[in-house]
Amino acid sequence: MAGWFELNKNDKGQFSFVLKAGNDQVILRSEQYETKGAAQNGIASVQTNSPQDARYEKKTAADGRPYFNLKAANHQIIGTSQMYASEGARDDGMASVKANGATATIRDNA
């Protein structure tokens, strides 16, 4: 099964999205947006930028765990991964975002 986006609204009225892989695992999480339209634009940016290797920034948290950011052409962060146990797992997560990020399927829970 292919991945999908889930668009959500929190109790403060802010919007965010996650990208899920076909196994229902969250592989990318957005920031909080003030409007639904801004969150939808974030999804469109993931769809455009996720296939491009140059848009991924490999990072290491203060505790040593690897993660990554997906960035737009203007270098703004579109989404952030979970923390991984190894660099190999992080790289697998990046490959999953590349494989699933262009999906047009959006589950609108907002």
Image (spheres, helix red, strand yellow):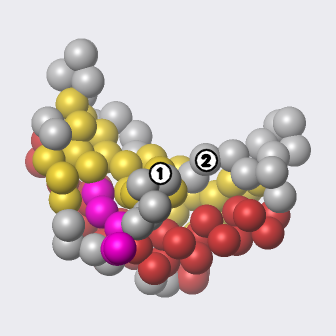
Which of pointers 1 and 2 indicates the residue nearer the eye? 1
Above-or-below relation of 82 to 23: above
Above-or-below relation of 74 to 10: below
Q: Is residue 19 left or right of residue 82?
A: left
Q: x, y percentage for residue 25?
A: 49, 53
Give the magenta-colored segment's residue range.
1-5
Q: Which amino acid does label 2 sit on?
A: Gln
Of the numbered discs 1 and 2, the one sitting upstream in the chain is 1
Is residue 60 among what the camera can see? no
Magenta span: predominant SS is: loop
Secondary structure state at the residue bearing disc 1: strand
**x 18%, y 22%: residue:** 13
**x 71%, y 63%: residue:** 90
Specify the quadrant that holds the N terminus: bottom left
**x 51%, y 63%: residue:** 70
Q: Most extreme residue toward the right, as rendered? A: 64
Q: What residue type is labelled 1?
A: Val
Q: Nearer the viewer, residue 18 or 38?
A: 18
Q: Which mark is residue 26?
A: 1
**x 23%, y 16%: residue:** 11
> Is disc 1 in contact with disc 2, using a CB cutoff of under 8 Å?
yes
Q: x, y percentage for residue 94?
A: 59, 70
Q: Which of 79 and 3 is in front in this view?
A: 3
Residue at numbered disc 2: 82
Q: Is 92 contained in the magenta span?
A: no
Q: x, y percentage for residue 9?
A: 21, 31
Distance between the alpha carbons at the discs numbered 1 and 2? 8 Å
Q: Nearer the viewer, residue 8 or 78?
A: 8
The crowd level at tag 1 (other Cα within 10 Å; few <14, some 14-19, many 20+) is some
Q: x, y percentage for residue 61?
A: 77, 43
The crowd level at tag 2 (other Cα within 10 Å; few <14, some 14-19, many 20+) is some
Secondary structure state at the residue bearing disc 2: loop
